[in-house]
Image (spheres, grey):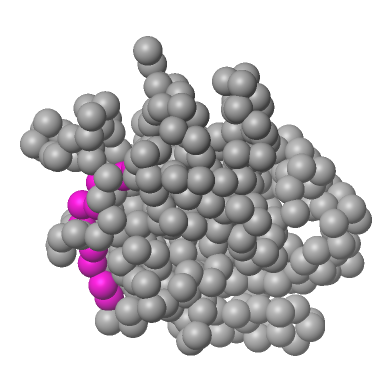
């Protein structure tokens, strides 16, 4: 019998599945606690569930995990983790220390189909969506490696466009924020999109997590050249849905603005950006382009970045130049690669279902989004 990865279910879906097996719905809370607070790797460990129910669970479900492949730490403490999936693809997550906060940047896809020209993930193309289990296991394994430094904030800004894997992204948020799961406040979870308008519209009504938009340009021709998705959802439509977001959610929007020399680093772009404040409040993270293999764009001069920032600050816009984290280890924005791991997965320890065995820890050094 094909078993379902139990970590790929939201809380409500697990309740429904248990009812279908004749088990009480309240066991969903018990199972979530075992999976996400105690990190159980075997149904046999779930001792507050009856033995027949545990056997039934093991017949129908498996407990998914990832295989840690490598870890690399930059000068500022930013650490990039690489994980192998059961089909041999690899993904990456980035842990960014910022004072007493630790932000974890999660991937939602292997590669990305949106093809933003400044992004290594996009240049490498799309392979597949991640399951909920593959998304939340990134947190589980990074946290297991760093027990003394709890991850305080989660951002969906790693490999992939989260809204192109919308349902699994929302299920993952459900696990992250569930009282029986990781118990994060929605205020500490942010989803970043390149601007998929229909999904933003759904998100407004279906999630309480924060929204960030990878904006990058204020003219359609410039934005389309940088981000082909803009030809499908041009700036006018994007701004309209963001107005709606503010009207209904009252929340601030964060704009990520990757600055590229001679493309979008002029004062004209800053002026256009400042005009948006008439419509809704927002903050801006300016991100001078990170170098990566394959990019044909250049990083802007520091004085251009400074002038851009000063213009926005002068118009009372909260604006930070984001310190580049982990550029030397290719862990900064737009530098995540991943892909197929060039080794046979049969070399890896296997669990009884033939998947790479559960690993918590044991990262090796040296590995080669938004
Ligand atoms: S910036 Fe984000 S949406 Fe664009 S290609 Fe990269 S991962 Fe995909």
Q: On the picture, is 184 further left or further right than 271? A: left
In the rendered image, is residue 276 in sight? no
The residue that appears at 33% across and 79% down in the rendered structure is 77
**Front-most of 243 and 191?**
191
Q: Is residue 95 above or below residue 21?
A: below
The image quadrant where one finds the N terminus is top left
Q: Which segment is the magenta one?
A: 65-74
Q: On the picture, is 96 further left or further right than 235? A: left
Q: Is residue 57 above or below residue 299?
A: above
What predominant SS class does the magenta segment belong to?
strand
**Front-most of 32 and 227?**
32
Outermost residue, top side: 1
Q: Residue 119 location, x and y as percent?
A: 41, 51
Q: Quadrant of residue 217?
A: bottom right
- Figure disc tally: 0
Q: On the picture, is 70 further left or further right than 215? A: left
Q: Residue 335 location, x and y as percent?
A: 35, 57
Q: Quadrant of residue 87?
A: top left
Q: Is residue 208 above or below residue 103?
A: above
Q: Is residue 68 magenta?
A: yes
**Front-most of 187 and 217?**
187
**Front-most of 303 and 13?**
13
Q: Is residue 149 magenta?
A: no
The residue that appears at 76% across and 38% down in the rendered structure is 202
In the rendered image, is residue 320 in sight? yes
Q: Is residue 86 above or below residue 312?
A: above
The residue that appears at 44% across and 45% down in the rendered structure is 47
Q: Residue 251 location, x and y as percent?
A: 80, 63
The residue that appears at 60% across and 39% down in the rendered structure is 27
């Amino acid at each position: 019998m094909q078993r379902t990865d139990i970590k790929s279910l939201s809380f409500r879906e697990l309740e429904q599945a248990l009812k279908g097996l004749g088990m009480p719905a309240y066991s969903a809370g018990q199972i979530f606690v075992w999976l996400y607070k105690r990190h159980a790797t075997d149904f046999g460990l779930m001792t507050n569930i009856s033995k027949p129910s545990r056997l039934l669970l093991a017949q129908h479900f498996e407990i998914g995990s990832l295989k840690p492949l490598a870890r690399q730490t930059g000068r500022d403490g930013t650490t990039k983790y690489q994980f192998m999936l059961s089909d041999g693809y690899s993904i990456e997550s980035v842990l960014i220390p910022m004072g007493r906060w630790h932000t974890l940047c999660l991937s939602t896809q292997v590669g990305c189909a949106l093809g933003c020209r400044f992004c290594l993930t996009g240049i490498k193309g799309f392979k597949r969506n991640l399951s909920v289990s593959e998304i939340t296991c990134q947190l589980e394994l990074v946290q297991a490696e760093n027990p003394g430094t709890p991850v305080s904030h989660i951002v969906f800004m790693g490999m992939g466009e989260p809204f192109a894997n919308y349902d699994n992204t929302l299920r993952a948020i459900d696990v992250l924020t569930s009282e029986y799961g990781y118990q994060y406040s929605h205020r500490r979870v942010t989803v970043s999109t390149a601007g998929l308008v229909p999904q933003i519209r759904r998100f407004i009504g279906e999630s309480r997590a924060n929204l960030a938009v990878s904006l990058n340009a204020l003219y359609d021709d410039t934005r389309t050249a940088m981000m082909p998705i803009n030809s499908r959802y041009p700036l006018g439509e994007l701004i309209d849905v963001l107005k709606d977001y503010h009207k209904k959610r009252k929340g601030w929007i964060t704009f990520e603005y990757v600055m590229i020399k001679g493309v979008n680093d002029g004062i004209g772009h800053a002026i256009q950006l400042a005009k948006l404040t008439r419509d809704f409040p927002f903050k801006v993270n300016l991100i001078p382009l990170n170098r990566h293999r394959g990019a044909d764009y250049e990083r802007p001069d520091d004085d251009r970045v400074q002038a851009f920032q000063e213009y926005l600050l002068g118009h009372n816009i909260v604006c930070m130049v984001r310190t580049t984290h982990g550029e030397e280890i290719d862990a900064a924005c737009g530098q995540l690669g991943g892909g197929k791991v060039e080794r046979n997965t049969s070399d890896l320890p296997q669990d009884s279902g033939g998947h790479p065995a559960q690993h918590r820890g044991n990262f090796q050094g040296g590995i080669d989004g938004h």
